[in-house]
């Protein structure tokens, strides 16, 4: 018997791989996040879309990368390797657009403990990574921050997590490392500045903040979504649809689901038309 919260993985530019089905066979039973919240195994949560926009330079870079990716067709291994690099560069760009930092400054108010921030790993024009700029924003507002990336040792990561649990720091800023295998039930709030096109990532990230804990009646998730018009270029069209696939996934089980479906009804309807 196999048990998994995320049996499949989906990444941009790759077909869904179902290796576990090859070994264990078809899924025989499912238990959704919505059911777990209803049965009080997970805490309820609010989901807030933070609308962000590319500037002209970012949009041009996105279009150029998308066109390069579109032209890299075929089974040639070298071409596939170049395409993978371009996809990675484009994902970096999406995750680190400048407006996300501006909107983060706008929405953070009073200091709250037990908070996670998921950052991208691109650098700005001054050579600073998004995680460094995000840490600076929170530090300037009086938050005590810790950092977890691939550069820290397991021992250092464990210490940072313990510091959050013990209240010595208010927030952990990270680059992907906290997606899986971390249990911090006290976490109540998450800011998602960068996301991949992976349902596994969506589920794991919600799982970080939905664990039950004493004196925790709900969790709050802020998702920084790249906005724009569906009538714009085809390349940006595809990005926008991918962003709202994630929004719909997160909104489905949120306590403020009704207001989200009213506000973004047109976007969700367009997604359904493509199905």
Image (spheres, rainbow, N blue to C red):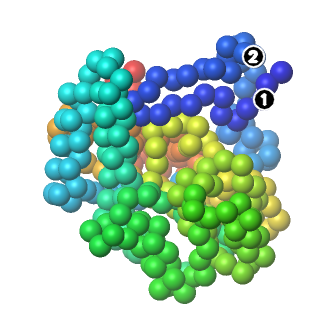
Q: Quadrant of the N terminus?
A: top right
State the image coordinates of residue 96 (x, y, percent, origin top left). Answer: 36, 58
State the image coordinates of residue 170 (x, y, percent, origin top left). Answer: 64, 76
Q: Measuring 32% from the left and 59% from the top, which residue is drawn there?
A: 97
Circle 2 — which element? helix
Q: Is residue 239 visible?
A: no
Circle 1 — which element? loop
Are there few (<14), some (14-19), or many (20+) residues within 10 Å of tag 2? few
Toward the viewer: 144 or 43? 144
148 is higher (above) or lower (below) than 253: below
Q: Measuring 27% from the left and 68% from the top, which residue is drawn there?
A: 125
State the image coordinates of residue 180 (x, y, percent, origin top left). Answer: 66, 47
115 is higher (above) or lower (below) than 63: below
Toward the viewer: 64 or 267? 64
102 is higher (above) or lower (below) than 267: below
Q: Nearer the viewer, mark 1 or mark 2?
A: 2
Toward the viewer: 154 or 55? 154
Q: Quadrant of the C terminus?
A: top left
Question: Which numbered tag is attached to residue 148?
Answer: none
Residue reaching furthest to the front: 78
Which of pointers 1 and 2 lies earlier in the amino acid sequence?
Answer: 1
Are there few (<14), some (14-19), or many (20+) residues within 10 Å of tag 1? few
Mark 1–mark 2 Cα distance, whole angstroms, equals 10 Å
Q: Measuring 83% from the left and 65% from the top, which residue is drawn there?
A: 214
Mark count: 2
Q: Which residue is mark 1?
A: 3
261 to the left or right of 65: right
Determine which quarter of the picture holds residue 252: top right
Q: Which residue is mark 2?
A: 24
214 to the left or right of 265: right
Q: Measuring 54% from the left and 36% from the top, which residue is drawn there?
A: 199
State the image coordinates of residue 18 (x, y, percent, origin top left). Answer: 60, 20
């Amino acid at each position: 018997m196999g048990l998994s919260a995320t049996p499949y993985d989906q990444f941009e530019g790759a077909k869904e791989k179902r290796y576990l089905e090859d070994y264990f066979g078809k899924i025989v039973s499912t238990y959704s996040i919505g059911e777990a919240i209803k049965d009080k195994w997970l805490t309820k949560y609010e989901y807030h879309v933070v609308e962000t926009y590319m500037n002209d330079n970012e949009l041009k870079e996105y279009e150029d990368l998308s066109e390069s990716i579109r032209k890299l067709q075929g089974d040639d291994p070298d071409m596939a390797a170049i395409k993978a690099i371009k996809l990675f560069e484009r994902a970096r760009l999406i995750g680190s657009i400048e407006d996300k930092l501006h909107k983060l400054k706008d929405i953070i108010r009073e200091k709250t403990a037990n908070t996670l921030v998921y950052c991208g790993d691109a650098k700005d024009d001054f050579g600073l990574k998004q995680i460094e700029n995000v840490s600076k924003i929170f530090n300037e507002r009086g938050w005590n921050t810790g950092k977890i990336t691939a550069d820290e040792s397991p021992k250092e990561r464990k210490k940072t997590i313990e510091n959050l649990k013990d209240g010595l720091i208010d927030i952990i800023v990270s680059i992907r490392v906290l997606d899986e295998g971390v249990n911090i039930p006290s976490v109540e709030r998450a800011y998602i500045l960068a996301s991949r096109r992976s349902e596994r990532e969506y589920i794991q990230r919600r799982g970080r903040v939905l664990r039950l804990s004493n004196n925790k009646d709900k969790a709050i998730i802020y998702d920084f979504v790249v906005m724009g018009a569906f009538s714009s270029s085809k390349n940006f069209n595809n990005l926008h649809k991918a962003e709202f696939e994630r929004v719909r996934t997160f909104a489905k089980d949120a306590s403020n689901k009704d207001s989200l479906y009213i506000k973004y009804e047109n976007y969700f309807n367009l997604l359904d038309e493509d199905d």
